[in-house]
Image (tube, rainbow, N blue to C red):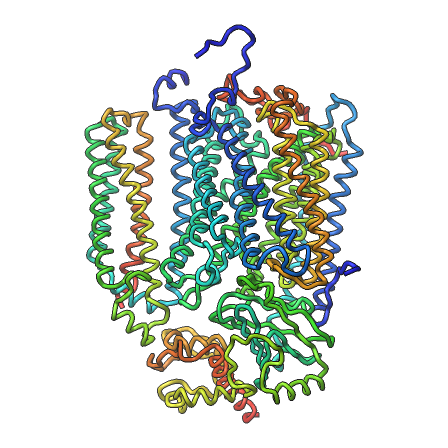
Amino acid sequence: MAHSDHDNPALGHHWESFEQQHQGNVMGMWLFLSTEIMLFSGMFLAYFIFRMLYPDMFTAANHFQNVFLGTVNTAVLIMSSVTMVLAVRSAQVGNNRLLRIFLLATAFLGLVFLGIKAYEYYEHWHEGLVPGLHWTNAELIADEAKGIFKGSAQIYFFMYFVMTIIHALHMTVGLGIVLTLWWRARDGRFLKEGFDPIELIGLYWHFVDVVWVFLFPLLYLLGKQG
Amino acid sequence: MAVPTLALPQKKNYINAGSGLKSWLLTTDHKRIAILYLISISIMFLLGGLMAALIRMELLTPAADLMGSDDYNRLFTSHGVVMIFGFLIPSIPAVLGNFLIPLMIGAKDLAFPRVNLLSWYIYMVAGVMVLWVLFNGGLDTGWTFYTPYSSSVSTSEVLPTTLAVFIMGFSSILTGLNFIVTIHTMRAPGMTWFRMPLFLWSMYATSLIMLLGTPVLGITMLLLFAERVFGVGIFDPALGGDPLLFQHFFWFYSHPAVYIMILPSMGVISEVIAAFTRKRIFGYRFVAFSSIAIAIFGFLVWAHHMFVAGMSIHAALIFSLLSYLVAIPSAIKVFNWSATLYKGSIQFSTPMLYAMGFLGLFTIGGLTGLFLSALALDVHVTDTYFVVAHFHFIMVGGAVMGYLAGLHFWWPKITGRMYSETWAKLAALITFIGFNVTFFPQFIVGFLGMPRRYHTYAPEFQVLNILSTAGASILAVGMILPIFYLTSSLWSGKRAGKNPWGAAGLEWETESPPPQFNFDETPVVTVGAYNYGPVEDKIG
Amino acid sequence: MGDIPLFPESASTASGQFDIMFFFMVFLAVFFTVLVAGAVIYFSFRYRRRSADEVPPQISGNTKLEVGLMVPLAGLALIAFTWNAVLYMNMWDPPDDAMEIYVAGKQWMWKMQHPDGQQEINTLHVPVDTPVKLLMTSQDVIHSFYVPAFRIKHDVLPGRYTTLWFEATDVGEYHLFCAEYCGTNHSRMIGQVIVLGQADYEEWLATAGSTGSPTTAGDSGMADSGGTVAPEAAGAQLYESLGCAGCHNGGVIGPALDGIFGEEVQLEGGGSATVDENYLRRSILQPNADIVAGYQPVMPTFEGQVDEDQLFQLIKYIESLSSDNAETEQ
């Protein structure tokens, strides 16, 4: 029976069966995501330490975020997760047309997210909120000089840029893979036994979304009520 | 394409399965990738060794005579970066682990062969960056990159080096991921967890650390990189940052990284001792679980590098206590290996000589590690040559000895040839003597108070430094000899046959060198590891 | 040259206690090393392979033995831990009457200042049999103050104070090393601790005071702020010239500073802090970080207006306000 499976090009030569291959692939992706969790944990830890050291500075700097755009982006990403779930489902049940539609929809939503994010970066640049490169925001510089808060607001924006840029890079990679899969899905290769790649990119996509769900309140909302 | 004739064709194996550079550079065969790694890490090792030789020559006298302080600082930094990131971390996993894991569990390859090749290319990109830095200005921060020196003051090539270390991390992560998935999902029928050779348990534990620790080093390097580029104070107190935060981040990876380097050697030692005593390892489950325990506890002790760094006393007390905890699984291992010798049938082949050297040196390295996790004692000896000596007892006496034991043990399997046993034993002996003469005096000179990373030093430290340098020249001979006799064995070595040592284990049941897909038929496992005879559960 | 030195000089109260503990640890290490090496060598000869086809008895293990071994090992570990912990805690707990010396590290030199203001570079004169507390900070990167003969060491960090203390027991000259790698001339950031008899120290103080300059020749890259003026006196002048009195005297706009040193204060927004060197340092450089409850965040920062030495002088002045009070109360 293993030999009959090997006639199917979707089964790698070194695997004994589709079941084994599937198990290995899924586990590999989960392990990869666990390293991603450690990567982001490091950043979150640094974020919390500086937040603890300089709470007023975080509130002051936070104030410059565009909460409306952040909220829209959060909604866009959650919708993209839904379309991704539908894409995986379509591959499992063998509907290639729907699979390709949902992949494209997911990619489109991802693109919208990145576009909005880029616009926000443009705004930050415009307002002089880019640490090191273009730090000219009069309000923050004046408050800092007056000692209204301790620490430098550059630290907040530094953490903000590091975290969101790394997140955006993950989005970009995901977007590239989704589009590649969409293109390669023309021949229906990802249906039924061949659906591992779709499931894996689905896991990855959800993970990147979940990271954003943590980033959004931490970077945009906390301290707003004050 | 010539059709093989009946005139006794040479058996197909992974080496002659394809020819030409391209067949090697694009291979996805785990055995060929292991060879690619073997060549690249050997180059790194020789470079790192060369730097060590220069360091020892400079330290022959208290004054600066060979080079200026800036050059000396670049030298010991590069020695550390090249040896740790370029050699020790990949050494056993990427060469022996890559080659042996599928063989030992009866699989055709690792779970993700293309990812495996990718991780070698990533390693090469990072390795070339490290070498580029070496010849273009160098790095002078020490391999520990302490801030704010590295982030704000040093004018050397911090940026490309941190980037290289960051990139090299991916290689490590992908290797670890590949190993874990392989061990979980690809074991041959009948190969249960507790029938696995202990080498696999140690590889599994190592992979766990690679997966969970390396990303934290990655983000640390990234933050340091960004701090330097944008001048924002994450780690520099002058800009509002916290230098201790960097140390916490750095050691959170770099202490477990020490276990990335030593655990694989422990695995090798288990295999070698079992084979050359013809016995199962005493307390198999204790040894297996102690590997996992080391991986887990290893994540809880990082701040014992910071007892005089300005951390709170309470934190220091906790980290000291936890550090003793991690010593217990190591002690269990040493006890079990020694107990395996008891009533064995001990054969003094080269791998066994290295393994016995390992036992002694690792014991000293581990016990002096307890000196360093002892709070008051650490205050005096930390940042002195005592630390240098301890570290090299673990890394050279432990990790490198283990690597050499493994390389000699599986060389016949990898190449299909036997090396000269006489030369190999001689090299093992020279290495052992040279090592001790080099590094033992450093314990004393460190206890006397000579700080590490000193280019010039007080005259009363000279005698011990001369001894150490003399030892280094002996050690160098021991390290260079294998290059000759191992290389020459490729042409003139005796054919090895399937199982030259009479060892148990799946890897010895296939041809030497193994065929492209390891086994002609998927093996079925019915017995546990080290099945040299029926078990008697009595002692004495 | 000649004899191989094996043991460093021991010249402080801590080093004597340290050495006893160290011998205990060495004894343990030697014992276990000999045990393991002995077993390996003995078994190797006793059980060497005698015929090519011999099969030794297969022993799978012994759980009782393993656990039984762990217990005494854990016990020994606990002894080593506790012993070290006690010595360690003592290292950071200077006696109240310790003489305080200010140490500033800078690439690549050490500057010390005595309580009465005498300064020296790379050399530290101290009296024998007197507890000495070092209040240390760095002006650039991390350094580490290490005196092997006293068995003490602590990192010296920029942006905060760390402390260390010792009581020298023998007159003599001892090495001072920088133990944390700090750049090009790290190995030349060295000096001496010179332990003098009480009378000799007094005499040295007087001489050093009369010359009014560092006793050791060297390129002084550090501002020589005020010769032999005691730091609290210099601090009092600064306190006036910077206008601190305007708000802090009387405690209307800012908290009164008399007797505040060493006390615990309630902070605005909850929490409390002990007023020590690091708290005062923060309060001068980042005044609105930890505001004392009941006050407004109106104090401007003095970051960039006072240098490391002046900061130290101000802190010593505020500290002296407390000791004066304590004396009058008694």
Apparent side of residue B116 relative to residue A226 in the rendered image (left or right): right
Q: Is residue B520 above or below residue B231?
A: above
Q: Residue A33 appears in which quarter of the rendering?
A: top left
> In the displayed image of the protein, which residue is found farthest to the bottom?
C328
The N terminus of chain C, quarter of image: bottom right
Which one is nearer the viewer's eye here, C162 or A205?
Answer: C162
Q: Is residue B423 above or below residue C17?
A: above
Image point (31%, 29%), residue name: A195
Image point (54%, 88%), residue name: C229
Percent of width and height locating residue B266: 61, 39
> In the displayed image of the protein, which residue is found farthest to the top?
B6
Image point (47%, 22%), residue name: B19
Q: Residue B263 appears in which quarter of the rendering?
A: top right
Q: Taking the image as drawn, is residue B216 in sight?
A: no
Apparent side of residue B243 relative to residue A26 in the rendered image (left or right): right
Q: Is residue C101 above or below residue A164?
A: below
Image point (40%, 86%), residue name: C242
Percent of width and height locating residue B225: 41, 55
Percent of width and height locating residue B95: 54, 34
Which one is nearer the viewer's eye here, A15 or A118?
Answer: A118
Which one is nearer the viewer's eye here, B48 or A154?
Answer: B48
Percent of width and height locating residue A100: 21, 32
The C terminus of chain C, quarter of image: bottom right
Q: Is residue C111 above or below residue C324?
A: above
Apparent side of residue B479 relative to residue A54 in the rendered image (left or right): right
How many numbered discs, if any? 0
Q: Taking the image as drawn, is residue B306 in sight?
A: yes
